[in-house]
Amino acid sequence: MHPIAEKIQSRFPEGYVGANEWRGDLTVTVKREALHEVCSYIRKDPDLDYDYMVHVSSVDWPDDEERFEVVYEVYSIRKRHRIRIKTRVPEHDCLVDSMTDLWMGADFMEREVFDMMGIRFNRHPDLRRILMPDDYTEGYPLRKDFPVQGKGWRDTFDFLNDPT
Amino acid sequence: MKLEDQRTTVYKVDPNHPETESLPTLRTEELLLNMGPQHPSTHGVLKVILELEGERIVKSTPVLGFLHRGVEKLAEDGTYHQFIPHTDRLDYVCAMYNNFAYCRAVEKLMDITLPDRAEYLRTLVAEVQRIIGHLFWLGTQALDIGAMTVFFYTFRDREILLDWFDELCGARLTTSWYRIGGVERDFTPSLTEKVQSFLDYFPPKIEEYVVFLEKNRIWLARTRGVAVISAEDALSFGLSGPTLRGSGVDYDLRKYEPYSAYPKCEFSVPVGKNGDTYDRYWIRIEEMRESVKIVQQCLNQMEPGPIMADVPSVTLPPKDRVFTNLESMIQQFKLFSQGFDAPAGEIYCGTEAHKGELGFYIVSTGGGRPYRLKIRAPSFIHMGAFDYMAKGYMIADAVTIFGTYDIVMGECDR
């Protein structure tokens, strides 16, 4: 196992779920409750020192019980290593702790995840839609049950739904 | 002077000053100003709501999404090959680099290595694209803050390279020249000649731009000490590219995680000190000089050879064979109608575009389409730091700050 994954496991035996290394990318999956603690640890620990926020992303797995996956990818400029921290949340309670207190860049990136996937972030200073309009009510576009052609007012046009 | 001191407001009335009492009482209130979505300096459609105290920015709220086209959603609906033209439309000023970043990500997913010539061609064209990007930035940034002449000079030289792209792939801006596993076509002798003559022509031209700007008092006054950010904050915001290097961090993926033909070329990464717009300008000028060196080295080191990896299940057959050979035609047809079978897994691959780290995070569950494709667009992430960097500056400096990131809204809103 990767030494960094081992380190996280020994430090957070409760929150640790699994690790995976593929094509040189290290991924560590943790429980949602431990996410903020783990991130705060890897941010502040001098040996890990992940000071650079690369991206925040989300994946929708509609068939799973814990439907959404939140992905944080961070990099260390001084140590030159990167890690991906993932966690799962169920649909009825998709709430994750915000990382804005650790990396300021998480502000916009988490807003995008909220806008596109509908995952809410606890203690986020300004959780609003960012790419879609503020008054957009048709759902979250990157969810798998959202059609590519869009939905909402377009569905009300008869001539678009007329099979002939 | 400390970074924080440079941005303190000096125009505030000192309450302890003996003359303060005799000043007439003015009614003051904060003013909301909508800047954009139609404003020539926003390089696309960007709106920023500025809260002003006099002419000082107290708070700014960027309103994004005017150019949102749902590219990440569209990616899930097409094959890996079909997504390449979409990447042209992300950062439409620098389409080649977007193609490059995307193809590299898919190659990492498929675990393909490229033949040497393909790597050299890619690096060469990417660096030419970097020069175009920086020329575009220099021209428009100078235009936005009041120096018009430079614009004509940089666009004159940019045209030469765009015509060169036209000859290379038939398009000036939306190029789609990169392919998964290689490039679309090789250089002709005339293209090699033209790029060589450009390399001889270009370095003295950089001196011309510098003459226009470096002794220009307006340029200096409007770039020095404007949009200052410390290295620590810049890292915390995830800034990258010249915006980050201006603050003194030498983070450049070409050096940190070398890829393509960069490890075989000698070049240096210019790093700034003060973290202001002037340092970022200087870095971009130096990067153009470095790019010229890289292009020259690629041109010298390049040997004849294949320009496409030989992985028939993924890469496209040579075009001349498609029309003469039945198997190649079937291969081409299958690759475009069904795509190739990607292994299940997820990768992130970042590439140093001229704006910053352009990354693609791809989740695959097998099959010909990405399950999820996330674009890490530097322009979007740079906009996250806008409020922080604009606080305390004048309205007119907002324009400088848009420019200092080199934002393009196509990439920001995706």
Image (cartoon, coloured by chain):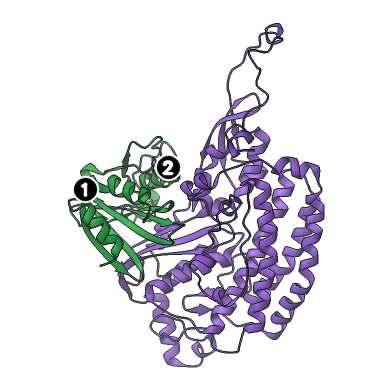
Chain colours: A green, B purple
- Calculate the distance from the C-alpha at mark 1 to the C-alpha at mark 2: 22 Å
Residue A52 or B101: which is nearer the viewer?
Answer: A52
Name the residue type under label 2: Asp
Q: Position of residue A33 (x, y in %)?
A: 22, 45
Q: Chain of mark 2?
A: A
Residue A52 location in percent, x, y? Answer: 44, 52
Q: Residue furthest front?
A: A46
Query: Tag 2's secondary structure?
Result: helix
Q: Residues within 10 Å of mark 2 (few under 14, many from 20)?
A: many
Looking at the image, tell me whether mark 1 or mark 2 is earlier in sequence order. 1
Q: Which residue matches tag 2?
A: A107
The label nearer to you, 1 versus 2, is 2
Q: Chain of mark 1?
A: A
- The answer to whether the residues at label 1 and label 2 have Cβ atoms under 8 Å apart is no
Q: Quadrant of the N terminus of chain B?
A: top right
Quarter of the figure with residue B333? bottom left
On residue A90, the disc is 1
Q: Nearer the viewer, residue B371 or B363?
A: B363
| Residue at point 58%, 79% (across, down) | B120
The secondary element bearing badge 1 is classed as: loop
Residue A115, placed above or below residue B301: above
Depicted B363 relative to depicted B64: above or below: below
Residue drawn 46% across the image and 82% down it: B316
Residue B46 as seen in the image, left or right of residue A148: right
Residue B339 visible in rendering: no
Judge the density around disc 1: few (<14), some (14-19), many (≥20) Cα neighbours within 10 Å.
Answer: some
